[in-house]
């Protein structure tokens, strides 16, 4: 096992030793039962004080990575417990990163520079929805803002391609637009696909109360109107009973007051006044589980 020590570092030498041994165990470079160099041997090889090496070994013993065998030396524990704490799991990811880097055979200077750039970048503090369709952006952004306390904004693909447009942002995209959006993003920037709700699961409990009645479908997004029309027809609703309206058009409310129910999107319910009589069904496009996905970023940002 190769070791490096930096006397000028603010990290004590014994901690440098203990950390490198831990990482070597996690990566498999050091095997269970393998003997470590003696205190005197390490001290002589790296010109450090024997007490410093002993302190590093004692730390490893306390943490359960190695064991003293009387009269024989220091050995890697025969059965090292799997990573359980967040710190141990993080160490495993760091080990995997350095293994991947070694396979790339990049110069150490280039690696350090790239890692430094990532660390120096401002931590993310808001979401950005990237979508080419204005109506889709309005609906999805309305829903995203209900699911997270983080600020959220939306932009076109052309706007996302501009320098610094996504600084400190977590970009989001519809699954069908992932390839298009990723093509304009900087290399290495994570893109989160939206989790879309199942229309079948949403319609099943509501259909008995809708069948045989006039049903309004209201949305400025043509895809929403067409999907609703298709799903209702597939579920056995007579197409002649559908009153489909685009709220951007004049007199869009005409006929809706005669319906028994109105299906609409989140942006429409937030920005338009619907007739009072019919029952309003808000069909959310985003799955409930997506709130948990968003919280992983907003909750973890305080630790970055």
Image: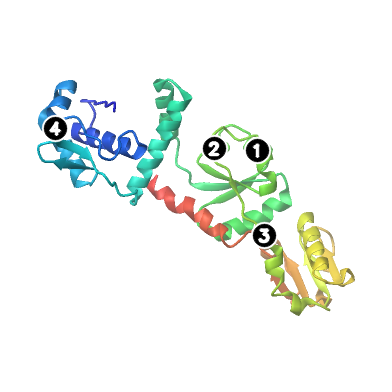
Between disc 4 and disc 2, the foreground one is: 4
Q: Kindly identify the residue that appears in the image at 83 percent across and 67 percent down.
A: 233
List the residue tagged with mark 1: 159
Which of the marked residues, 1 or 3, is nearer the chain's N terminus? Answer: 1
Residue 249: give x, y in percent of width and height. Answer: 83, 59
Residue 285 is marked as 3
List the residue tagged with mark 4: 52
Figure quadrant of residue 107: top left
Between disc 1 and disc 2, the foreground one is: 2
Which of the marked residues, 4 or 3, is nearer the chain's N terminus? Answer: 4
**Residue neighbourhood size for the residue with mark 3, other residues' Cα within 10 Å, grouped as few (<14), some (14–19), many (≥20):** some
Between disc 1 and disc 4, the foreground one is: 4
List the residue tagged with mark 2: 189
Q: Kindly identify the residue that appears in the image at 74 percent across and 68 percent down.
A: 263
Which of the marked residues, 1 or 4, is nearer the chain's N terminus? Answer: 4
Question: Split into 4 quadrants, where in the image is the C terminus?
Answer: top left
Q: In the figure, 236 relative to 186: above or below?
A: below
Disc 2 element: loop
Which of the marked residues, 1 or 2, is nearer the chain's N terminus? Answer: 1
């Amino acid at each position: 096992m190769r070791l490096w020590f930096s006397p000028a570092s603010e990290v004590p030498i014994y901690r440098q030793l203990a950390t490198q041994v831990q990482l070597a165990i996690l990566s498999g470079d050091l095997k269970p039962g393998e003997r470590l160099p003696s205190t005197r041997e390490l001290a002589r090889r790296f010109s450090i004080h024997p007490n410093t090496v002993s302190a590093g070994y004692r730390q490893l013993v306390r943490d359960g990575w190695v064991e003293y065998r009387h009269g024989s030396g220091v050995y890697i524990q025969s059965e090292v417990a799997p990573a359980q704490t967040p710190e141990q799991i993080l160490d495993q990811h760091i080990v995997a990163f350095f293994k991947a880097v070694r396979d790339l055979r990049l110069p150490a200077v280039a690696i350090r520079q790239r890692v430094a750039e990532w660390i120096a970048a401002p931590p993310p503090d808001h979401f950005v929805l990237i979508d080419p369709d204005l109506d889709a952006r309005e609906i999805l952004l309305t829903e995203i803002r209900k699911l997270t306390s983080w600020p959220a904004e939306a932009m076109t693909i052309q706007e996302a391609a501009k320098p610094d447009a996504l600084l400190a942002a977590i970009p989001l995209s519809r699954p069908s637009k992932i390839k298009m959006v990723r093509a304009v993003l900087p290399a290495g920037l994570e893109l989160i696909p939206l989790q879309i709700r199942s229309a079948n699961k949403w319609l099943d409990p509501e259909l008995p109360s809708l069948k045989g009645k006039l049903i309004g479908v209201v949305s400025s997004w043509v895809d929403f109107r067409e999907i609703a029309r298709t799903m209702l027809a597939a579920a056995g609703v007579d197409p002649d009973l559908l009153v489909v309206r685009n709220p951007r058009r004049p007199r869009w409310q005409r006929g809706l007051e005669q319906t028994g129910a109105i299906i609409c999107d989140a942006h429409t319910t937030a920005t338009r006044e619907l007739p009072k009589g019919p029952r309003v069904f808000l069909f959310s496009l985003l799955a409930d589980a997506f709130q948990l996905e968003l919280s992983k970023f907003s909750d973890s940002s305080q630790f970055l």
